[in-house]
């Protein structure tokens, strides 16, 4: 399976952050801010550093596609509230 440009961008940034922090743990966090116009906010971290991407594709969908390709492994899901959650992944690439 060929990576899309968005998947390549995210994977490249995750690899770089992983090397900087010497960890393969990637954390996806989502949080409901509780009122409009805000709403659901989500981000990805490696050792506390936010990994930002330039595309608007939903982060959780890109992460799950990388899991299906074997680039990431979903290790743990922590459901904080109905809307808020943390997903911990292991990066399987060098």
Image (spheres, rainbow, N blue to C red):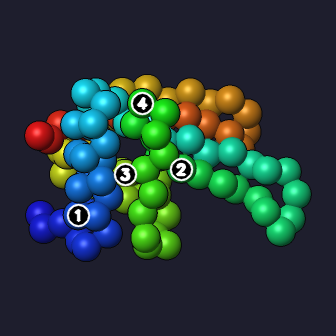
**What distance separates the C-alpha of mark 2 from that of mark 3?**
11 Å
Q: Secondary structure at mark 3?
A: helix
Residue with the most extreme right position: 35
Q: Viewer-nearest of labels 4 and 2?
A: 4
Q: Viewer-nearest of labels 3 and 4?
A: 4
- Disc with the residue nearer the chain's start (3 vs 4): 4
Q: Position of residue 8 (x, y in %)?
A: 23, 63
Labelled pair 3, 4 in contact (Cβ < 8 Å): no
Q: Name the residue beneath numbered marker 3.
A: 63
**The C terminus - image quarter:** top left
Q: Which mark is residue 47?
A: 4
Task: Name the residue: 42% across, 63% down.
Answer: 53
Q: Name the residue beneath numbered marker 2.
A: 43
Q: Which mark is residue 8?
A: 1
**What distance separates the C-alpha of mark 1 from that of mark 2?**
17 Å
Q: Residues within 10 Å of mark 1 (few under 14, many from 20)?
A: some
**What distance separates the C-alpha of mark 1 from that of mark 3?**
11 Å
């Amino acid at each position: 399976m060929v990576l899309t440009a968005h998947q390549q961008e995210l994977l490249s940034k995750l690899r770089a952050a992983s090397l900087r922090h010497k960890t393969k743990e990637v954390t996806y966090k989502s949080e409901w801010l509780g009122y409009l116009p805000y709403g659901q906010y989500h981000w990805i971290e490696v050792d506390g550093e936010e990994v930002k991407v330039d595309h608007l594709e939903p982060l959780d969908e890109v992460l799950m596609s990388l899991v299906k390709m074997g680039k990431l492994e979903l290790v743990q899901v922590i459901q904080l509230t109905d809307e808020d959650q943390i997903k911990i992944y292991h990066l399987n690439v060098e």
